[in-house]
Image (cartoon, rainbow, N blue to C red):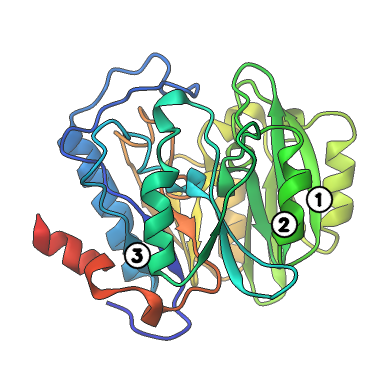
Amino acid sequence: MPTGSNAPVFLVSPPRPDWTIRGRANVFAKDAEAPPAAAARADWVAVCDAIEAAGGVCAVVDNAVEPGLTGLPYTAEAGLCGRDPDTGDRVFVLPNLTPPHRQAEPGVIGPAVRRLGLQTVDLPDDLRFEGQGDVIKVGERFVCTAGVGPWARTSVDAPDVIVDLLPGPWLKLVFHADPWFHGNTFLGAWSKGRDVVVAVCDEALRDDGPALLRAFVDGARVVPLSKADTLTYATNALQVQDTVLAPAGVPDVVVDAWRGLGLTVRFLELPALFKKGGGAAVCLTNRLDGVGVDDVPDDMRLSAWKGRQ
């Protein structure tokens, strides 16, 4: 396991042995036949092993309490790391999830992230907010997204509430929530040093969103995606140090852009959690900016979880 103090830490949560597809609250899962739980767990282990092989650390939320929370493995929606604007303390904004079967998740996530040294922040009950699924980090900047349409998840006014907790400049974009349901389904960013690549599907954005985005990420290389490209989940490829963990089948132009940054690309199939459940490596993780390796208790390490199986 990597032990460097600068190793990125990712919050993850394994599918329970009784995992299945429940809510079908995205275009991938709506008609999918539920895969066996063992297949989902194998996908999850593959992602975690790849993260740690690339130099990251997994902080595992092992949900042994609530059998109905089958959405927990998609921890991008578990919340968002930020900073208290008054004290500068690290905080974790807990989500208010839209699918009914996921609304109890903060009761599991909150105690876990507090063990990592994070203060938790609750949002108003009537405000839907799905964490890093709708807050995309572009270098040291943040693009906050909200959808309008049948697959909408984060409320349009949610970004206005959480932006004060973001430790950097921000932009709010509204998108068409059909077929897209989170910002990370049509927008992604990767970087090395000062070089940044942004991939985006302009068709997903409403009004003058494409122009606003390009002005906000001025200096980055922007790779345009078609609607079909987004369904490969190119924007759901996770950067860990100098490695990108990508779904198989992403467009060559995106792969070339990653390699142009000097990043190594590793492809992960994830037939259960991605192709049927609806989320690739970004969806299956929550990047804990500001949390160090030493903040992760031994019993939350991936190796400890494996030892309990």
Q: Quadrant of residue 179?
A: top right
Q: Where is residue 172? Give x, y as percent.
A: 80, 45
Place of residue 40 in the rendered image (x, y in percent of width and height, measured from the top left): 24, 38
Sequence-first disc among 2 and 3 = 3
Residue designated by label 2:
142
**Secondary structure under badge 2?**
strand
Q: Residues within 10 Å of mark 1 (few under 14, many from 20)?
A: some
- Is residue 32 at least partly visible in the picture? yes
How far apart are the two marked residues, 2 and 3, measured between alpha carbons? 23 Å
Which part of the image, by quadrant, shows the C terminus? bottom left
Give the mark, 3 or 1, whose residue is nearer the N terminus.
Answer: 3
In contact (CB < 8 Å): disc 3 and disc 1: no
Above or below, 33 relative to 301: above
| Horizontal arrangement in the rendering, residue 196 relative to residue 259 (left or right) | right
The picture places residue 288, in percent across and down from the top left corner, at 50, 65
Residue 121 position (above or below residue 231) = below
Per the image, the residue denoted by label 1 is: 171
Q: In percent of the image, x 43 and y 17: which residue is there?
A: 30
- Kind of residue at disc 1: Leu
Per the rendering, the mark at residue 58 is: 3
Give the SS element for disc 1. Answer: strand
The amino acid at mark 2 is: Phe
Tell me the distance, in whole angstroms, between the alpha carbons under discs 1 and 2: 6 Å
| Element at label 3 | strand
Is the C-beta separation of discs 1 and 2 under 8 Å? yes
Dot 3 crowding, Cα within 10 Å, few <14, some 14–19, many 20+: many
- 59 horizontally vs 224: left or right: left
- Residue at 76 percent across and 36 percent down: it is 157
Residue at image x 34%, y 22%? 22
Q: Earlier in the sequence, mark 1 or mark 2?
A: 2
Q: Please state which amino acid type lies under the numbered disc 3.
A: Cys
Position of the N terminus, as image quadrant, is bottom left
